[in-house]
Image: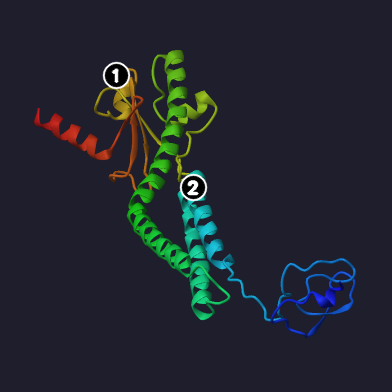
Amino acid sequence: MTSKQEIQKNVNHTAMLCPCCGTSIVRGVLRCDCGARFVGEPLDEVPIKVQRLGPAMTSVALLLAVVAAALVATKWMAVGVVVVIWYAWRAARLARRDPEWYGGLRTAIATLSLAIIGSAALAAYGISYIPRAIDNYGTRHVAATEAAMYHVWSSLEDYKRAFGSYPKDAQEFRKAIGESLAADYWERTLKYQAKIGDIAEQKDSIERTGLAFNHFELRSAGPDGIIGTDDDVIMRDGIFFTNSDLKKQTAVQQLR
């Protein structure tokens, strides 16, 4: 029995080509003369639409990447959430405009919502962090100035061990040490003052009495560049003070 005799019921008699040998045969037969067997009707020419999830999944992947970068590297990587918002918005727009071709609408909307909430939280955090960042920025400048003072203090101690007294002024310091006083962070030379006691005496009076300079003060004018203001950086005998602390000490001494 040939293949033409093995036609099923309700056979469509439209001719087709055997995909194996290319022979023209009747649609619906079970096998061809070449031995090829058919497991089902050939697919029609109507295109099959498969929803694309790429845009939605890309926005999810970007969100995860931004979160991981912010946690592992630096929190400022979180600004990449702007890219996530754009991709998620694009994915949601494509899914709404052409739902037959693009899927993942709910995923895109959820990702967009999370990205917007995250960006709002990031903005709030950034605004609240600004004052602290400014303080930290200023603290680093003060720390650099204090480091320069520590360097001068070490040289002053070497001088005192050698001569039994601190140098009376910056010129004597430069002559003995072989270098000028260090500069603060703002590249202004530190101010140096030698003292006998807690209250600085006039230099000519000290020279007449022959008393040793057992105390010293190093002072930086601070960010504003004005000596005597509250942002001055002050070291006395290796200890740091603020200008307000010194004013309080002076007031207490006057009351006594």
Q: Residue at x 79, y 74 (%)?
A: 6
- Above or below 161: residue 112: below
Residue 225 shows up from this direction: no
Q: Nearer the viewer, mark 2 or mark 1?
A: 2
| Quarter occupied by residue 238 | top left
Query: In the visual, does 238 lie left or right of 90?
Result: left
The amino acid beneath tag 1 is: Thr
Dot 2 corresponds to which residue? 74
Residue 209 bears which disc, if any?
Answer: 1
Q: Nearer the viewer, residue 147 or 45?
A: 45
Q: Residue at x 45, y 40 (%)?
A: 184
Q: Secondary structure at mark 2?
A: loop
Residue 53 appears at what percent x and percent y?
A: 56, 66
Q: If you read the primary sequence from the N terminus, does the residue marked by circle 2 or circle 1 appear first?
A: 2
The amino acid beneath tag 2 is: Thr
Tell me the quadrant of the picture where the N terminus can be found.
bottom right
Residue 179 appears at what percent x and percent y?
A: 53, 30
- Above or below 215: residue 41: below
Query: In the visual, does 211 lie left or right of 167?
Result: left
Q: Disc 2 versus disc 1: distance between alpha carbons? A: 61 Å
Tell me the quadrant of the picture where the C terminus can be found.
top left
Residue 156 bears which disc, if any?
Answer: none
Q: Nearer the viewer, residue 130 or 245?
A: 130
